[in-house]
Image (cartoon, grey):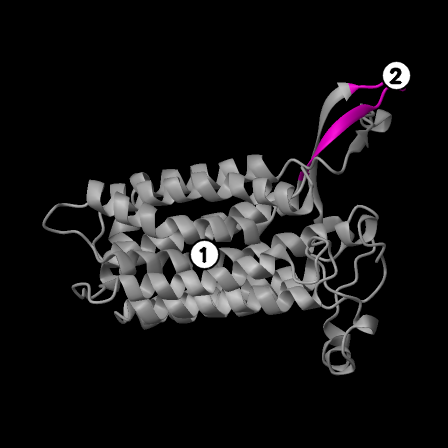
Amino acid sequence: MTLFIVVTAVLSAIYLWWGIRFLPAERWQMAAAVPVSREADGSWQGVNITWYGILSANAYGAAALLFLALAASLGAPLVLTLSTLGVTLALCVPASRLVARIVEGKRHTFTVGGAVFVGTITAPFVVSLMNRLLAPADGRLPVMALLAAVASAYALGEGFGRLACISFGCCYGKPLSAAHPLIGRLLTRRAFIFRSETKKASYAGNLAGIPLVPIQGITAVLYTATALASAALFLSGQFALAFLIAMGITQLWRTVSEFLRDDYRGDNRISAYQIMGILAVAYGAATAFYFRGETPIIPDPGRIAAALWTPAAILPLQCIWLAILFYTGRSTVTGSRIFFHVHRERV
């Protein structure tokens, strides 16, 4: 267990350091531009493929991998974990756009908060159903154990996913000048400054070149640390505590952190996402209470490598990565014009 947590922590720390250090820069927003139609002046209209999409795909992939790893330590059949994962993603990924449309009135944006709320409400039902249908009748797993694996994986996925927000300049914080003086003093050297006109903080908030509260970076570190703590508790067999810590910290911080954000979150002083966060905490507590008293099971981290180092586990993870890239990586709010030319001196 210790080796698994330490290796995950070290790799996560390196990834977060890189993202927080470099992703606010202009060059880390667009990864590619694909020409789609030719213009009269010889240029091409392009569709931008964003780092937001690549980093979101990384986040979903990391979350899926952690869920499969923790479930494998329980001896869960791969068909059960993949089915649970697939149904959960099928519900939550479209919800990330649908809830944003309902709450913010915007068709071309995503909301992790809305997707998480949908996932929180549906997860107990999905896990219970998949466990009943796909686990052996004499070997059904504790529902709370699988829910704890889901919660830990979610915390890691959203922690990594905040790097995508840094890259695109969305989910941005308030200007340091508008924050509490103590916050301003603490975060002066760590503020995010977005200069590109295509960063959302620039075109939606008119905040280009202004030091902002690095709320995305703070959330990334906090959620990733929460995921690691929750995973450690999971592997020690404390499923309910792992679940409550992952749900409690992430959703309470979602509620508090909204006060440090400056992007549009609805017209009310208390946003719909803050209400969702509070309801998710209460619902999570009720879920843990409902599933109390299940037959205990001891995770075995030694099962993880053997269960995951197979094509049956690797190929679905690759498919998830590609599907998320395709869904979130094609920018609909930015465009590009592409010119091609020949280097005559090289002919």
The three-letter amino acid code for the residue at tag 1 is Tyr
In this rendering, does residue 249 appear at all?
yes
Dot 1: element: helix
The three-letter amino acid code for the residue at tag 2 is Ala
**Residue 333 image position (x, y, % from top left):** 74, 38
State how many labels appear: 2
43 w.r.t. 2: above or below: above
**Residue 174 image position (x, y, % from top left):** 76, 65
Earlier in the chain: of badge 2 and badge 1, it is 2
Q: Name the residue nearer the viewer: 321 or 105.
A: 105
Judging by the rendered image, the residue that carries numbered circle 1 is 154
**Residue 89 image position (x, y, % from top left):** 44, 42
Judging by the rendered image, the residue that carries numbered circle 2 is 40
Q: Residue at x 26, y 54 (%)?
A: 72
Report whether 86 appears left or right of 11: left
Residue 193, image quadrant: bottom right
Report whether 186 appears left or right of 284: right
Q: Residue at x 28, y 62 (%)?
A: 290
> Which quarter of the rendering shows the N terminus?
bottom left
Assess disc 2: are there few (<14), some (14-19) or many (≥20) residues with their C-alpha within 10 Å of its C-alpha: few
Please give the range of residues in magenta: 38-49
Q: Residue furthest right?
A: 41
65 w.r.t. 277: above or below: above
Residue 230 on the magenta segment: no
